[in-house]
Amino acid sequence: MSSTTDQDDHVTVIEPASGWELPDFRELKAYRDLFYFLVWRDVKVLYAQTILGFAWAILNPLMQIVVFSVIFGRVAGIDTDGIPYVLFSTVAIIPWTYMSDAMSRSSESLVTGQNMLGKVYFPRIVYPLTPILAKLVDFLISLVLLVGVMIYFGATPGWNLVYLPFMIVLMILVPASIGLLLSAFAIRYRDVKFAMPVVIRMLIYSAPILYTASTISEPYRFLYSLNPIVSVIEGFRACLLGTPMHWQYILPGTLVALAMLLFGALYFRRMERVFVDVI
């Protein structure tokens, strides 16, 4: 939806978007109070009526780390280039948990919030972006676990740590791009809700979360590097564990993430005109 204002009569006219165009991100500033309310509501509702509350932001990745460390670290004996498997997996699972949770919630955001879509105008892009920001609270809390594991194993970041802000931004862009696309797609095709859990389970094996990227055969490495999740995981390990910054894995996935974000925003904008009709 787009809006134009007649300055003489102070009348706002809501018009559907024509063709392929980007959402008006300036509207987010005008509706920042609503945006803030929805983000904070998501954070509070998630842990409402729980005994452990925000502790689940640590327990969730911790349980994954324990299970994967036993199965892949001890039983399977996965090679981690000399890095203790618990440390190796923790550095990957913390950002992965954020991305997987944010992707799932963002893709379902318009369907779960459909009651408001036909009642009042606000920039619809607020919905898929809300869980992207809300899940950052969990991510920040889970950093306590990450720092604790690093201290226990005596891991010291090298100069690559300067790239960590870039990697965090990339970590946010990945679920944002997928969320914009799938949330708009899910309005018409509710199969997305059923497909996402399967996709998430598959994606964890498509990136070097449980294994090293060096295990991928040479002929497939470029194709492998096009996965933006690979870029995030490789980047986090290089920043926090002092391993080499493998740009051959990071740059291609970054470009793909940016392309996905652009297409996701364009597709979301184009589909806005039918949101209310389909619901």
Image: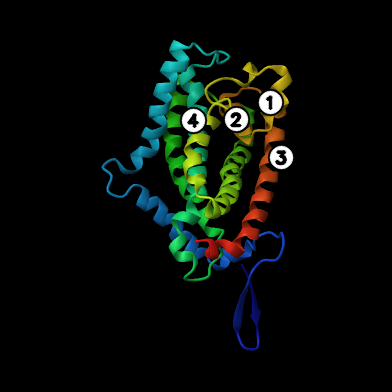
- Element type at marker 4? helix
Q: Are marks 1 and 2 in contact (CB under 8 Å)?
A: no
Give above or below for 42 relative to 100: below
| Mark 4–mark 3 distance (CA, rounded to whole Å) | 23 Å
Return the disc, 4 or 3, that comes first in the chain's sequence: 4
Of discs 3 and 1, which sits in the foreground?
A: 3
Circle 2 is placed at which residue position? 239
Return the disc, 4 or 1, that comes first in the chain's sequence: 4
Amino acid under disc 3:
Leu
| Residue 263 as seen in the image, left or right of residue 185 | right
Amino acid under disc 4:
Ile
Circle 1 is placed at which residue position? 246
**Residue at position x 69%, y 39% in the image:** 256
**Residue at position x 53%, y 35% in the image:** 199
| Mark 4–mark 2 distance (CA, rounded to whole Å) | 15 Å
- Element type at marker 2? helix
| Residue 246 as seen in the image, left or right of residue 44 | right
Amino acid under disc 1:
His
| Mark 4–mark 1 distance (CA, rounded to whole Å) | 19 Å
Circle 4 is placed at which residue position? 93
| Mark 3–mark 2 distance (CA, rounded to whole Å) | 19 Å
Of discs 4 and 1, which sits in the foreground?
A: 4
Give above or below for 35 relative to 207: below
| Mark 3–mark 1 distance (CA, rounded to whole Å) | 15 Å
